[in-house]
Image (cartoon, rainbow, N blue to C red):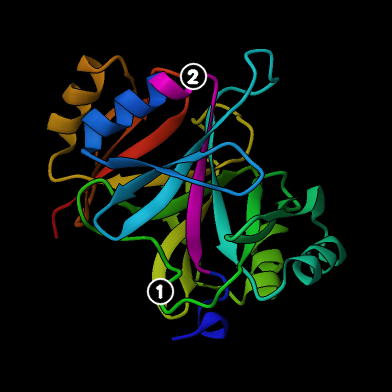
Amino acid sequence: MGLQDQIGSFCWWSLMTKDVSKANDFYHQLFDWHLSEMEIPGHDNATIYAAGKGGFANPVPIENDFPFPSHWIAYITVANVDQACQQAEKLGGKVSVPTFEIPSVGHTAVINDPVGSAFHVFTPEQDSDDLNMMGKGPGEICWMELLVDDPTPALPFYSQLFGWQFSAPMSMNGGDYYTVKVNGEDVGGIMKRPPDVPKMPPLWMNYFSVTSVEQWSEKAQSLGGKIVMPKTEIPETGFFACIEDPTGAHSYLFELTR
């Protein structure tokens, strides 16, 4: 499988954090991730987070006065970053960080979709047979989700930019839910914000696979994290909870039961 077969796949994540050391300790102890240092010519070394499938994420320091809290941001595979940026703007998106090189790694840029959610597009320097870094093992990112007031502008944007396919909407908690299929695999969803959910900035959220939401929620709290949403059942599927790490970044824990 080459690059052209993996367009639109989630290939990396960065944790934009106001305290790298605290974040590293939290996630290493929570998920037993392996942390290593990677040399990048002309830049500071990068810390790499690795789970079952290998390296998949890195922390990026942001200043304390940065206007947004710590957060995760996803990278999506494209054949050519510059061309993807041009197409994104034609489709109603905005390039917020233009193309730049990560020496010996590849090229990337940051795009905001028409509803305001940010993500990276990424083209590797060398072709790879497995750019999809989502997985179902412990501590791996198993699902991605975007909660928005109106999914209508987002659906054609992602479909035309990445070739994503969407299911017919299904009702969930009073909002429509569109499952995202990438290269034949269900990998996430875009959901219309239910009426009882507070308004918030649109953000692609990570779901981390665990064997027990209850146990990992308790572990997250013992390591200095917070429970934003307690264990909740998804009928005939599993359980999830939303946590906040000690630096303020939110993510979900997910336990598959079916």
**174 or 66, which is in the foreground?**
66
Secondary structure under tag 1 reads loop
Tell me the CA gap for discs 2 and 1.
31 Å
At which x and y percent is residue 247? 46, 19
From the viewer's perspective, tell me whether residue 89 is left or right of residue 39.
right
Q: Earlier in the sequence, mark 2 or mark 1?
A: 2
At which x and y percent is residue 227? 31, 21
- Residue 19 is marked as 2
The vertical placement of 135 against 125, above or below, is above
Secondary structure under tag 2 reads loop
Residue 79: quarter of image: bottom right
**258 or 128, which is in the foreground?**
128
Residue 170 visible: yes
Magenta residue span = 9-21
Q: Amino acid at mark 1?
A: Asp
From the viewer's perspective, tell me whether residue 194 is left or right of residue 28.
right
- Residue 130 is marked as 1
Q: Residue at x 49, y 55 (%)?
A: 12
Residue 194 visible: no
Quadrant for the C terminus in the image: bottom left
**196 or 160, which is in the foreground?**
160
At which x and y percent is residue 130? 40, 74
Q: Are marks 2 and 1 in contact (CB under 8 Å)?
A: no
Q: Amino acid at mark 2?
A: Asp
